[in-house]
């Protein structure tokens, strides 16, 4: 996989973090809240690994 494509895909995924956070504010989320929390944890891990692999190229905060 091309490095630029990888960077673009990680940035695209990371841009959805705010949406996941907004889901946590919903009262009707029920047991899916566990899945949303898991997705946020994995996304944070992905962002940390990205920043470790590409120092100086932080993912812009949306």
Image (tube, rainbow, N blue to C red):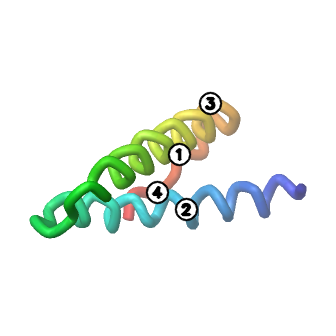
Q: Which residue corresponds to mark 2? A: 13
Is 42 displayed left or right of 49 in the figure? left
Q: Which residue corresponds to mark 4? A: 60
**SS for tag 3?**
helix
- The percent position of residue 51, horizontal first and vertical second, equals 58, 37
The Cα–Cα distance between marks 4 and 3, rounded to whole angstroms, is: 15 Å
Q: Which of marks 2 and 3 is in front?
A: 2
Quarter assignment of residue 11: bottom right
The Cα–Cα distance between marks 2 and 1, rounded to whole angstroms, is: 14 Å
Q: Do the residues labelled 1 and 3 touch (CB within 8 Å)?
A: no
First along the sequence among labels 1 and 3: 3
Q: Do the residues labelled 2 and 4 touch (CB within 8 Å)?
A: no
Q: Which residue corresponds to mark 3? A: 52
Depth check: 2 or 36 in front?
Answer: 36
The Cα–Cα distance between marks 2 and 4, rounded to whole angstroms, is: 12 Å
Is 33 displayed left or right of 1 in the figure? left
Q: Which residue corresponds to mark 1? A: 58
Asked if residue 36 is positioned above or below residue 58 in the image, the reply reads: below
């Amino acid at each position: 996989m091309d490095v630029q494509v990888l960077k673009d895909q990680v940035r695209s995924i990371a841009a959805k973090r705010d949406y996941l956070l907004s889901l946590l504010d919903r009262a009707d989320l029920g047991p899916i809240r566990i899945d949303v929390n898991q997705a946020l944890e994995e996304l944070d891990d992905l962002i940390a690994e990205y920043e470790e692999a590409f120092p100086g190229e932080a993912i812009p905060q949306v």
